[in-house]
Amino acid sequence: MTNVTWFGALGYCQYFDGQLPSENEREKAARGSDNRPFPWGEQIYRENANYYASRDPFENMSSFGSRTSPVGFYNGKSYVGYQTLDSASPYGLYDMSGNVWRWTGNVYPGQHYRYLRGGSKDTYDMDLRIWVRNNATPTYFSPGVGFRCVKH
C-alpha cells in the first residue's frame, strides 16, 4: 500500500493485531547479524531493487517519477527479458530496500516527525543502504511511501 500516512499505517497494522516495526527491528530484518550495507549484500546493481534510474520495466520517467514494482519482484527470475537478482535479506525478506520508503513505529519524545527507512523508487541507490533514514510529518503521504506490519 502506498499513499498512506503514518497514522493510517499504524491503524492498519493495529487492526490486524500488528504494529509498525521499530527502526531497530527493521534494520535487523534487513541486515541480519552482519554489517552489510544492503539487505542482499555488499553491492547494489540495477537488478537488485526499484530505485531512481534502475531501469526496471515499471519505470516511466515521462510521468511523475516511476511506479512501484510488485512485492517480491527482485527474486532472481526473468520477467519479459528483464533479469532480476535474488535480493532477499538474510531472513528471506524481499523489498527491504527500494520501491517505497517504509514508516517505522518509533515515537521520539519532543519530536513531531516520524522516520521512514529503505529508500524508494524516487531516490538514488545510496538511499537504499540499510542505515539511511528519512523523516516526515505523520500526516505526510505520497506514491513513494508505504509500510510493513510486524507481529510479535
Image (tube, rainbow, N blue to C red):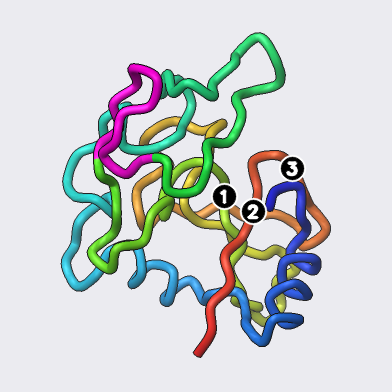
Give the residue at x 48% y 71%. Answer: 23
- Residue lying at the far top of the rendered structure: 62
Give the residue at x 45% y 20%. Answer: 53
Give the residue at x 16% y 67%. Answer: 34
* Amino acid marked by disc 2: Gly
Q: Secondary structure at mark 1?
A: strand
Cα separation, mark 1 vs mark 3, equals: 10 Å
**Residue 145: horizontal and vertical position, in percent?**
65, 48
Instruction: Give the number of marks.
Output: 3
Tell me the residue that label 3 is attached to. 142
Tell me the residue that label 1 is attached to. 101
Q: Secondary structure at mark 2?
A: strand
144 versus 40 height, above or below: above
Mark 2 and mark 3 in contact (Cβ < 8 Å)? no
Magenta-colored stretch includes residue 84: yes
Cα separation, mark 2 vs mark 1, equals: 6 Å
Mark 1 and mark 2 in contact (Cβ < 8 Å)? yes
Q: Which residues are magenta?
A: 74-85
Tell me the residue that label 2 is attached to. 146
